[in-house]
Image (spheres, helix red, strand yellow):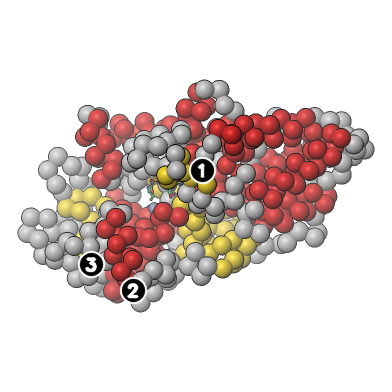
Amino acid sequence: MKAWTAPSMPTVNVDTPDAPGRLLVHDTATDRLVQVGPAAGTARMYVCGITPYDATHIGHANTYVAFDLLLRTWCDLGLAVEYAQNVTDVDDPLLERALATGKDWEQLAAEQTELFRTDMEALRVVPPNHYIGAVECVPCVSELVHSMHDTGLSYQIDDPKHPDWYFTSSAVPTFGIVSNLDRDTMLTRFAAMGGDPERVGKKDALDSLLWQMARPDEPAWDSPLGRGRPGWHIECTAIALKYLGPAFDVQGGGSDLVFPHHEMSAAQGVAASGDAFAQTYVHSGMVALDGKKMSKSLGNLELVSRLRAAGTESAAIRLALLAHHYRDDWEWTTDGLRRAEERLDLWRRATRLDAAQPVVDVVTRLRAAMRNDLDAPTALGEIDAWAAASIDVDGDDTDAPAQIKATVDALLGISLG
Ligand code: 5CA
Ligand code: ZN
């Protein structure tokens, strides 16, 4: 499906020989900082997309802005980026919401996906090269599951009414490498996150649904597996493998996806391709509101579109997100938004000066911060210090304001106009 319009991205016109030459990020699987992306050439990233049954909230925005920082840092290092993202445009929560509100499920998905595009564009998030809906990838999912059947990696359960297809999780010796959880914790989380450990007829409680055979009044597609629809985890496996190939550089999403979603998609990817699924698993923290994780199911939401409609500048929303390290869990507050507006004003005043403090050291430290696990809060502090110094003490560098403007735009996605 179509993504959204890409923001302009200037190149940073400052030579910083002392900045590190590679990007390090935290890998959930090994709990270490690791180099991500090749030294030269093309980096490949998959980020789990939305389930479009409600509007983009600040938690979603935080996740996509986090991976936007990763992409921008790769670009700044001279790499090309191949980026795929899905839209879970057919799944239980979407169908349930459509039923509850009397809306057509396809219309609901189309409307919410369009709102997401508008929000992403406003936040200057670089779009994926491959923006793929589950519905448009139904054939690629069913073919993948079918091919796994020949090698015993997928099977139909013995349920005459609903002989759904499942994944043989025990076929993958590396099952568990992403989350490193013990089996009991996996079982508890699997049950809590839409899994069905208790379902009779499965070979193992942790086997996950690959293809759900058609139910009355639910969407379904003909396939070599029988008429039905894709399971959730295999959707991301199939899209990532089709558009990026195996062993791509980064699998990303919010930390709520570590288990079961990323564990299952990775295991299925390993099983299907015989290679690693992703090389590194990167997870952003959860944003809360009123003391609880912001979530569509709880309804404690601050929406990007609502803030924008109330006149809040998108750059201020983005800066409010960047004030938190991408891996931290934090709470959205109007105070945080107000501080971001003040910061935006400070940066604008400084970059409108005819001359300012020189920037090579500032850009070196900013690049170093971003290349060290995408440390945006430290990067923001660097710009604050430069801006305050430039306003307080007359600098004589006439290139500096434009150089900082380009740096802030390219690396942080903030346009200072
Ligand atoms: N469609 C699936 C992924 S394949 C899904 O999880 N969709 S979602 O709409 O529920 O979430 C979209 C992305 O936002 C996911 O990466 C999820 O981890 C992230 N996310 C959801 N809630 C929050 C939150 N409160 N804070 C930060 N990120 C969040
Ligand atoms: Zn996913």
Residue plotted at (67% across, 62% down): 22
Furthest residue to the left?
160
The residue that mark 1 highlights is: 331
When asked about the image quadrant of residue 397, the answer is top right
Q: At label 2, which amino acid type do we have?
A: Val
Give SS at disc 1.
strand
Q: Quadrant of the C terminus?
A: top right
Name, please, the residue furthest toward the top: 310
According to the picture, the residue beneath numbered tag 2 turns out to be 172
Type of the residue with mark 1 = Glu
Task: Estimate the spatial distance between the alpha carbons at disc 1 and disc 3, rounded to whole Å.
Answer: 35 Å
Q: Which residue is mark 3?
A: 205
Residue 407: percent from left, percent from top:
73, 43
Tell me the number on the disc at residue 220: none
**Residue 65: x, y in percent?**
55, 44
Instruction: Name which residue lies at 51% across and 59% down.
Output: 282
